[in-house]
Every structure is written in C-alpha cells, then in structure tokens.
Image (cartoon, rainbow, N blue to C red):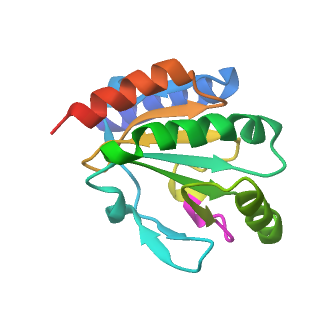
Amino acid sequence: MKNNFALAACRVALAGALVLGGLLSLSGCGGAQAAPESSFVLLDGSKRITADLKGKVTLVNFWATSCVTCVAEMPKLIATHNKYKSQGYDTLAVAMSYDPPNYVVNFAQTRQLPFNVAIDNTGTVAKAWGDVQLTPTTFLVNKRGQIVKQFVGEPDFDALHKLIEKLLAET
C-alpha cells in the first residue's frame, strides 16, 4: 500500500512537471529508475534495445519535425552530443508515431544529425517511457541504464551539461 502511494505521488509530480513544462528529478521518487525495456528501430533499419544504453550516459529525446521547440533545440542537442561523445556519451532521438517517416529522414539528412534517430511508428516506445505525448520530452540515462532526469520542453543546457559531466565521471 505504501509503495502504491509513493508511486501515485511520483505520478502526480510528473503530471505537475508536464503541466508546468519543467523538468522532473526522479530522485524524490525513490531515486533513479531503470529505463523501460524498449526496441528502437533506427533510420538505417537496424535495431537497438534499452540494454544497449548501458555503459554510456545517454540522452533519449522524444521529438517531432512539426514541433517548433524540438527543431529549435536540435542544434543544442547536436552541440551537446559532439562535446561529450568521445567521453562515453550518446544521444538517441526518437521521432513520434505521428511524424511522417519521410519528414524524419529528410530532417536527419539535411541537418546531418550525428546521432542515432529512431522512428516510433506504433507509439509503443513513447508509451513505455511514461506515455510521452508532449514534445520535446527528454530523458537522461546513466551508465547503469537508469533514468536520472526527465525534461519536458527544452532543457536548461548549462544545467544539463553539468549533470552529464557528473554522470560521465561516475564509475
């Protein structure tokens, strides 16, 4: 019963974060939680699974080509990826199910995205990651495969960089 109450409280906090367009720290909800089991289909047709995220600090970004904020933050995601990729950092951009695949491919090619892009054709990945509906929604996953921070809307990139550096320094 106590765990159900705590889970409900975390869901209320998440809903509040969504409404406010802010970030949610999962530390108040029993610490970092394991990233959900998912299968990501990349633009080249290959697949990655959640277990593949382990060993690196990974930013999982749910976005859409029709999302003005998503498009505006993409250069910052690229810069962040390029800044930390040699240190064990990765980025995975997950296009929402309503985003036409040809738009996603065109966006990735014309912007020369340096990280993996997946298309969530069925919406199952977004559902697994907390029923993501608002874009951008971004999760920062530590080397152990645990979500340590969720951002709804564009992150504060200075704060994000500090957290990435802290997570990269962990063994």
Q: Which residue is located at x 80 percent, y 43 percent?
A: 67
Q: Is residue 68 left or right of residue 19?
A: right
Height in image: 142 above or below 162? below
> Does residue 158 appear to the left or right of 87 in the view shown?
right
Name the spot of residue 133 as percent of width and height, x first: 69, 47
User: Residue 165 at what x, y percent from top left?
Assistant: 33, 28
In the rendered structure, does residue 98 fall within the stretch colored magenta?
no
The reply to whether residue 14 is in sight is: yes
Which of 68 and 24 lies nearest the eye of the viewer? 68
Tell me the chief SS of the magenta region. Answer: loop
Reply yes or no: does residue 123 show up in magenta: yes
Quadrant assignment, res 106 = bottom right
- Rendered residue at 38%/32% (across/down): 164
> In the image shown, does 78 or 32 lie closer to the viewer?
78
Residue 125 lies left or right of residue 27; in this view the side is right
- Tell me where residue 170 sits by quadrant: top left
Query: Which span is picked out in magenta?
Result: 120-125
The residue positioned 45% from the left and 37% from the top of the image is 83
Q: Is residue 23 left or right of residue 85?
A: right
Q: From what the image shows, is residue 14 above or below residue 33?
A: above
Quadrant holding the N terminus:
top left
